[in-house]
Image (cartoon, rainbow, N blue to C red):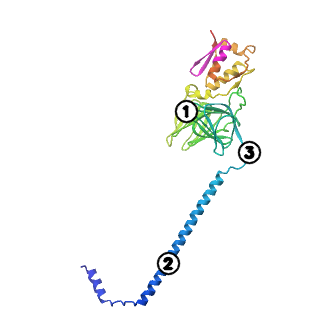
């Protein structure tokens, strides 16, 4: 045994025996212990009751908060766009989260959303100016009069649509913004496409420029560029043609145009803008196109621009050929 153990044993051996309490004292001590125990456990039960009441109150507050959140105030509906063309499966989601298929609705209001299905599309006249078009499998929310929130898919915006489109008007620079989970895309007088998926934001510019305020970077996309934003990576800038297959879905959603009393050059300028191609005349074709006595048009154009161009050329003894970024117009042989 250690020295410490020996010292402790010696100390205890010198202590006097402790007196043993009598039965009466023991009974008093036990009753005091029981009373203390009852007091402690009572306080615990009271705390548990208070805790349960607090939890219940919290649940009630949450329920009433949710109820008040879901309540829609009775306010006038604010229109932000009008439907000009649509096809395929299109669904509207109202402010009350009611999903309805598109049938007779022609106006879009704040608080609503649009979803397009496979092989579906829609063209809208933006009331503050410009033409907005939705590709297939696209969902857009209309949150205020100057912007949309693109949840998925891709949208096209033309800030200065052709005057042949009914109700078309130009938009002021910066007056239209596409909000996405990856950042904001603001037009600066342009034609552009904004696309999002679960990985990236893509902005393709056909004309003018757009400002992109991403989560981590800011960039300006110019004509003939596509900029891709992926997470924290540096944005990737690519050359991107203003015409061709990538833009076909935009032309397919082109609204009907009224050409009654218009000239052939006005019609061809619409085709040029919709297809992103420059019109180039042969000398003989230019004479016909500019002759005010022979080039007056009648009626409306319901076809998409490529088909409308083919049909119009047939009626005027002309032909058109696509060559890179131009449309060559010449006398039909």
Question: Pointer 2: residues within 10 angstroms few (<14), some, or many (20+)?
Answer: few
Q: CA distance from mark 3 to mark 1?
A: 40 Å
**Crowd around label 3: few <14 · some 14–19 · many ≥20 (10 Å):** few
Left or right: 33 in relation to 88: left
Give coordinates of residue 19: x percent, y percent.
Answer: 36, 90
* Placement of 148 over or under 246, stated as above or below: below
Residue at the spot of label 3: 76
Determine the residue located farthest toward the left in the rendered image.
1
- The residue that mark 2 highlights is 38
Relative to 89, say whether 76 is above or below: below
In the image, what residue occupies the spot 56% across and 69% down?
50
Q: Which residue is mark 1?
A: 226
For image coordinates 43% across by 90% down, the residue present is 24
Residue drawn at x 68%, y 14% as measured from the top left: 315
Q: Would residue 326 be visible to someone looking at this image?
A: yes
**Quarter of the image where the C terminus is located:** top right
Q: In the structure shown, which secondary structural element does the residue marked by tag 3 occupy?
A: loop
What residue range appears in magenta?
310-329
Which element is circle 1 on?
Answer: strand
Sequence-wise first label, 1 or 2? 2
Q: Nearer the viewer, residue 13 or 38?
A: 38
Residue 199 percent across, percent down from the top left: 51, 40
Figure quadrant of the N terminus: bottom left
Q: Disc number at residue 208? A: none
Name the N-terminal-most of marks 3 and 1: 3
Q: Nearer the viewer, mark 3 or mark 1?
A: 3
The one nearer the camera, 10 or 68, is 68
- Of the two numbered discs 1 and 2 in the rendering, the one whose residue sits closer to the viewer: 2
Q: Horizontal and vertical percent for residue 232? A: 50, 43
- Which structural element holds mark 2? helix
């Amino acid at each position: 045994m250690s020295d410490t153990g020996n010292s402790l044993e010696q100390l205890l051996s010198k202590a006097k025996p402790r007196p043993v309490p009598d039965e009466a004292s023991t009974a008093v001590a036990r009753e005091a212990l029981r009373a203390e125990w009852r007091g402690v456990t009572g306080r615990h039960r009271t705390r548990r009751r208070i805790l349960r009441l607090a939890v219940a109150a919290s649940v009630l507050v949450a329920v009433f908060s949710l109820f008040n959140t879901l309540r829609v105030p009775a306010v006038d509906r604010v229109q932000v766009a009008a439907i000009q063309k649509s096809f395929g499966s299109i669904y509207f989601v109202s402010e009350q989260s009611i999903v309805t298929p598109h049938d007779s609705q022609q106006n879009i209001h704040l608080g609503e959303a649009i979803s397009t299905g496979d092989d579906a599309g829609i063209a809208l006249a933006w009331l503050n100016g410009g033409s907005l078009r939705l590709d297939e499998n696209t969902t857009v929310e209309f949150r205020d009069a100057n912007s949309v929130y693109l949840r998925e898919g891709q949208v096209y915006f033309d800030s200065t649509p052709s005057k042949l489109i009914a109700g078309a008007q130009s938009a002021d620079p910066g007056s239209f913004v596409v909000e996405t989970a990856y950042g904001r895309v603001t037009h600066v007088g342009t034609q552009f496409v904004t696309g999002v998926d679960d990985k990236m934001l893509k902005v393709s510019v056909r004309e003018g420029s757009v400002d992109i305020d991403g989560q981590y970077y800011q960039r300006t996309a110019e004509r003939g560029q596509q900029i891709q934003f992926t997470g924290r990576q540096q944005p990737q800038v690519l050359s991107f043609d203003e015409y061709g297959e990538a833009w076909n879905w935009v032309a397919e959603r082109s609204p009907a145009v009224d050409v009654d009393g218009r000239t052939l050059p006005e019609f061809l300028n619409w085709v040029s803008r919709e297809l992103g191609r420059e019109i180039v005349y042969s000398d003989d074709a230019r004479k016909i196109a500019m002759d005010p006595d022979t080039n007056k048009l009648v009626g409306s154009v319901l076809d998409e621009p490529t088909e409308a161009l083919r049909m119009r050329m047939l009626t005027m003894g002309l032909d058109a050929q696509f060559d890179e970024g131009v449309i060559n117009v010449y006398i039909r042989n």
